[in-house]
Amino acid sequence: FFRKPLAANELTDQPLKNAPTLLIWAQGQEHGNYVHSPKTGLDEGHASVLDFYRTDELKYHGHKDQRGAAVLNFHGETRRDPCQGEWRYPSTCRGDSCAYTASWLANPHTEEVSFEIRTKVADRWTGLGFSEDRRMPNTDAIIGWVEKNGRFYVYDMWLSGYKEPTNDIRSDLFNVSAEHVDGVTTLRFARKFDTGDTVHDLAFTDGHCLHLVFPVAGGTYNSVLRKIGHHAQNPAVSKTTLCLHDCREPPAKKPPPPPPSLPPAERGPEGSSADVCSGSWRFPDSCAADDCEYTASWNYQASSDQVFFTITTRSNKWTGIGFSTNKAMPKTDAILGWVEETGRYFIMDVWMEGYEPPLLDPVQDVANMSGHRRDGRTTLSFARQRYSEDVGYDLDLDQCLYLVFPTHGGVFNAVSKKIRKHEQRPLISKEAICFTGCHPQGSTKPASRPSPPVGGAKPSSPAEDTADDSSFTPPRYTPKRGPSRKPSAPTTVPPPSLEEYHLRLQVLEPWQASYGVRGSRPYSLLSQQLTKGLEPALNEVSEKYQLKLK
């Protein structure tokens, strides 16, 4: 320890004035524990002078945590910034030498707080918790991990007791990212001061402060089952509470109320009373613009009699939208897709018969498709006719349907085009969305269902990346018609000679044992898909008699 006068009496001294002062510090190297970048002969053990750094000699300080700088006012009282902070373990560590670090930065304007968790404990989960009484029961927690392949998982969870935490029904996290670089696992996420979830989230409200819980050494994890093991070391808990209400700016004076006027038409997140042919939905419902984790918007175009959809999500998982008549997963029509990191997008029309993985529709009734990923946000755009030609696996939009919003989809395989189960249960619109009042141009009432074209559906554009490039969808043909002839007298036609053809098909989805059981639901669905897909192609075969799946 040493003392230094605030006033400078020598020309070689710097006075410490009542103002911010740049403080630069450094410490010498310790013998056998050198910090050089790049490494020198001392680090490699072949220097000509092995005891170059000696006691009580002023020599090079080295890199990394051997030196640093800070701005201080030695006259004033040092106050902590209520909007940011950091906690380290061990408490005496600095920088990369810490086994666990948690830092936070609050934004008083948006009332959001961002967290960054860094840990050196490999192959273990980590995270952060919030507690009212420094005890484990009734603790709000964010837990995650990063696999060796770079895939990460971050969950909003709740601890009701001393058992394994459970996933929140609604995740209130956004700006989620994670990485594992140079032996350090880093999680980043943000949340609102008050998420609005009064059951499974603790809020930083006026006068309500929370203790922070730091799992300095988490336990094992199972990425397939989304399960975590018991922590290897009891988490540390902050002695003092974090009070984010101190970070809020004082409320501005309210301007005088405007003169009374007629109330505007109410517009909810699921549509508008002024325009039944367009609407939007967002999650969380209190978010705005780019702050939302998931948004869905739709707009009916009378010129083409189509409904255009735009889906935006913060995650890099699959996403989309679904249509249901009863708010249940079985018998749900859906359009799902994703965007790869290379920029290549994939959008597919699927049908969910039950709670199994969705089945690819034989007819892909999706048009005007596009997709991109920018600034960490995935956007899919596509259109759907009000009337679909696929009566078996599509729900017409010219009716009242509940919309299904997969706010947190699952991982996808860009090669096999397969998707995993959603990470959180999709949300469903409270009210049914009705397009019955939308009419094409030149019509005052809904148009009738168009008759399906002879010979099957039109072929999809080869430039669009649809499900046809990876899953089984046979080519579609339009039958050739010869010149018209005048009617003639009936003649006796001999019965056609029957020929039998055997086709071997490759189904690009996991095989289920029930596919081979005649009369089972999966067998019937697979049979319908194959026969409906092959019917148009076999229209080219003259005297086609019968098609069956054996």
Image (spheres, rainbow, N blue to C red):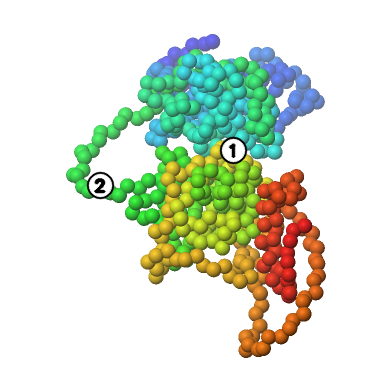
Please tell me whether residue 116 is drawn above or below residue 264 in the rendered image: above
Between disc 2 and disc 1, whose residue precedes?
A: 2
What SS does tag 1 mark?
loop
Q: What's the mark number on residue 263?
A: 2
- Taking the spot 57% from the left edge, 59% from the top edge, the residue there is 391
**In this picture, residue 193 sits left or right of residue 34:** left
- Taking the spot 44% from the left edge, 62% from the top edge, the residue there is 301
> In this orientation, does residue 389 appear?
yes
Between 353 and 67, the residue placed more toward the observer is 353
- Taking the spot 50% from the left edge, 46% from the top edge, the residue there is 326
Please tell me whether residue 34 is drawn above or below residue 437 in the rendered image: above
Q: How many marks?
A: 2
Residue 364 in percent (x, y) is at 60, 59
Cα–Cα gap, marks 2 and 1: 41 Å
Q: According to the image, label 1 marks what residue?
A: 423
- Taking the spot 64% from the left edge, 72% from the top edge, the residue there is 478
> In this orientation, does residue 416 appear?
no
Please tell me whether residue 344 is drawn above or below residue 357 in the rendered image: below
Residue 61 in percent (x, y) is at 63, 23
Q: What's the mark number on residue 494?
A: none
- Using a 10 Å C-alpha cutoff, classify the residue at mark 1 as few (fewer than 14 neighbours), some (14 to 19) or many (20 or more): some
**Mark 1 and mark 2 in contact (Cβ < 8 Å)?**
no
| Tag 1: amino acid | Glu
